[in-house]
Image (cartoon, rainbow, N blue to C red):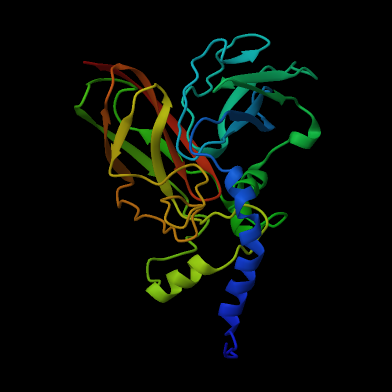
Amino acid sequence: MTYRAFRLSGSAAVRTLLLAAILPLAPTLLADTYQTGQHVEPAYEGWHPNADGTFSFMFGYMNENWMEQPDADIGEDNFFSPGEADRGQPTHFLPRRNRFNFEVTVPSDWGDRELVWTLIVNGVERKAYATLKDDYLVDNMVIASETGSLGPGTSSPESRSNVPPVVTVLGDNIRYARVGESIRLVAHVADDGLPERRRESTNTSQQLRGRMMRPPSRLTVGKVNGLFLSWNVYRGAGKVTFDPPLPKPWEDTRASANSPWGPLWLPPPIPEDGNYEVTATFDEPGTYILWTRADDGGLFHDGYITVNVEE
């Protein structure tokens, strides 16, 4: 047998070394990746004080599935304690990690008590425990860092000056629709232009391929800064189709994902009048709460409407 000597280029050598390191781990990595059938882990993200003396607990979740979007109605499978079971939490859960998904306001005399969110999804019970301990105090810099807009422990004059965008859903807060018929949704977004967009659409195909092959450069989640709007189901078990498709508000890190956490994602164009228009089509009757989020990369603002859908 004849052996031919060869020398790898720098980039080829790096890819070869990466493959050599990753391939032995592939079975383990795949074993921890699921499409359906897994539970949802509720997450306490932290708290912040309000101007009136009350406090807001901030919650999110980790849906262990990449595809399944399970539902858990308010009640024995989805409740808060002590006190009212319904604190405005979602009953429909998007895939993977969803940070700072909603807030629960507690009175100024809350003290050292715990507020517990319990979820049972696919037969698995999980709890998140919220307290006013100092270690959980959250500000805008923490939000930007935790969501990946900033590197860990970093900030800048731009990031410190940033304020959240403001989203306003135009029209009635309660709508009516029929199965299979589209309704029009218009949301106005006002923003200060910060943080500045970090990526434009002038990338060449070679640059995009290089970015796709580049190994991760940071240990924490990374996010592309740029203003976008998303619409999703917050409560309601039927499928809702939004047209045109909008960026995902959850951390989909795949290269081809329409998500700010995807390595090839480009911020969409911003309408000149600030009005984003979409249609929503429902495949089942019921009462739905639709959730829209305006996100500038670092900070966000949410809006909600209720849609009653009949046959």
Q: Quadrant of residue 223?
A: bottom right
Q: Name the residue furthest front.
A: 1
74 vs 221, left or right, is left
Front-lying residue, 87 or 204: 204
Q: Residue at x 28, y 39 (%)?
A: 278
9 vs 130, left or right, is left
Q: Residue at x 45, y 50 (%)?
A: 259
Q: Quadrant of the N terminus?
A: bottom right
Front-lying residue, 17 or 219: 17
Residue 265 pos. (x, y %): 44, 58
Q: Residue at x 52, y 68 (%)?
A: 213
Q: Quadrant of residue 6?
A: bottom right
The vertical placement of 39 against 75, above or below, is below
Residue 67 pos. (x, y %): 45, 38
Front-lying residue, 80 or 56: 80
Q: Is residue 156 visible?
A: no
Q: In the rendered picture of this protein, how many numbered marks are placed on residues?
A: 0
Q: Quadrant of the C terminus?
A: top left
Front-lying residue, 270 or 5: 5
Residue 89 pos. (x, y %): 53, 22
Q: Is residue 124 visible?
A: yes
Residue 302 pos. (x, y %): 47, 34
